[in-house]
Amino acid sequence: MTFVGFLKATPLALTMGILLAKASGQSPMRLNDCIQYALDNHPQIKIARLQVTDAEWQIKERMGPGLPQVGLGINYQYFLQRPGIPANAIGIPAPDDQKIFFNAFHSLAPSVSLNQLLFSHPYLTGLRAARAYREYTQFQLASVRKNLRDQVTEAYLPALLIEENLRIIDRNIANLEQLLRETQATVKAGFAEQLDVDRLQLSLSTLRTERDNLIRQRGVVLDALKLAMGMPIHQPIALADNLDSLLEQYAQVEPTGVLNLNNRPEYGALLKGRELSALEAELHKKFWLPSLVGFVQYQPAWQGGFGTSSRWFFIPSAIAGISLSINLWDGGLSRARYERAMVAYQTVENQREMLEQSLALEVETARRQLLNALERIQNQKQNVELAQRIYNTTSTKYKTGLASSFELINAEQQLYAAQQALIQARFNLLQAKVNLKKALGN
């Protein structure tokens, strides 16, 4: 096809959109391209990924207290007044004002310590909860990805519908323009009335006005698509798909598809939320479990300033031990937290039942819509064939003078209405297939 032929066969709005997109260095985008753009650039995806990263760091944060804890310290003390007792108070012969002191004036005590958590129920449960929360955020990310796919698809399809309508209008405008030229020539020859020309011009003007409205609507729809994709509004975009290509892409979607709840990320996220509530209840139910910590500490100390001597003495010490703590009664705090966690668990369980029913209803509704769309498109195809035969017959009779321009315009309007109805039926079929695929979680 030549470039001129391409311009004639392609709606002006679509042609200009493709040329603008190519001028900006961007190729026309298929539905999958738009979805991938959204998955790479939309802020919702970026936020969901950050939440997954945050959950991974929470696991490391939770693991930290269970790993060996090593500490260094240093302590210096100078006694402004040292504690002491009179020497003769303990049987040492000495003047009454002479005392025995228990400390030197100076004390320098560095230390190094090692602590290891040996057992802690809150620690183990918290670590399990952190890992479950990471899985929850991964389900959330999958849910965001699914929602973006659905939003982009729902925004992409109306643009295709407008383009199909533009294609039909352009074809009808071209036919009317040709017929108008022939009728004007016939009027000049004296074989037709000016009324026929006026009727054709009115019908042509109506189609052109509708075409202009569709072009403006197409701009609004494309802006909505950009918003769903996370694309800047000022950036030009052109679409490469059409209804035929997408109907072929979704040809494998059948009304007999079976719902698999595991394919719906929102269902998986709900189950993980239930698991988190169960872990919280377990944490507070076993509040009495002990915590066991082992520790080792070494302290090399120096003390100096005994009496009038300036000598320092090295006094090291080392200690190792185990610390055990058991919470016997906390005033009912753990019981209240446990009951609240169980309420949250039961709430999520009820939400699960509601979601299962909602998803099953969504699938059944999508099945019925698909069956209705399949039946409707067959009827509309027959209507277009019938309207086309009526138009062809009327056009032939009009050219031979056996039919009026009013009959021809009426037949042309009926054909255009049938073509629009077929486009709408094909659009509804595609939308029904998309909805069923979405409902099944595919």
Image (cartoon, grey):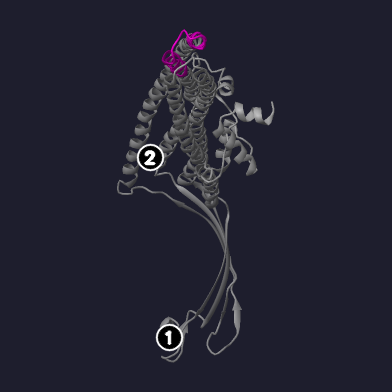
Does residue 324 appear anywhere in the picture? yes
Looking at marks 1 and 2 on the same chain, the residue that comes earlier in the sequence is marked by: 1
**Above/below status of 199 relative to 138:** above
Image point (46%, 25%), residue name? 204
Q: Residues within 10 Å of mark 1 (few under 14, many from 20)?
A: some
The amino acid beneath tag 2 is: Lys
Q: Which residue is mark 2?
A: 285
Mainly helix, strand or loop, the magenta region? helix
Examine the structure image and report whether residue 403 is included in the region drawn in magenta: yes
Does residue 442 appear anywhere in the picture? no
**Above/below status of 212 relative to 172:** below
Examine the structure image and report whether residue 264 is included in the region drawn in magenta: no
Tell me the SS state at disc 1: helix
Using the image as rendered, state which of residue 112 and residue 304 is in the foreground: 112
Q: How many marks?
A: 2
x and y percent of residue 317 in the render? 58, 67
The amino acid beneath tag 1 is: Asn
Please give the range of residues in magenta: 390-417
Judged from this view, the residue extending furthest toward the right is 2
Q: Which residue is mark 1?
A: 88
The quadrant of the picture occupied by the N terminus is top right
Tell me the SS state at disc 2: helix
x and y percent of residue 40 in the render? 58, 41
Q: Closer to the camera: disc 1 or disc 2?
A: 2
Measured Cα–Cα span from mark 1 to mark 2 = 61 Å
- Residue 372: image quadrant is top left
x and y percent of residue 190 in the render? 49, 16
Image point (57%, 26%), residue name? 242
Using the image as rendered, state which of residue 383 and residue 176 is in the foreground: 176
Using the image as rendered, state which of residue 356 and residue 372 is in the foreground: 372
**Above/below status of 372 relative to 1:** above
Q: Residues within 10 Å of mark 2 (few under 14, many from 20)?
A: some
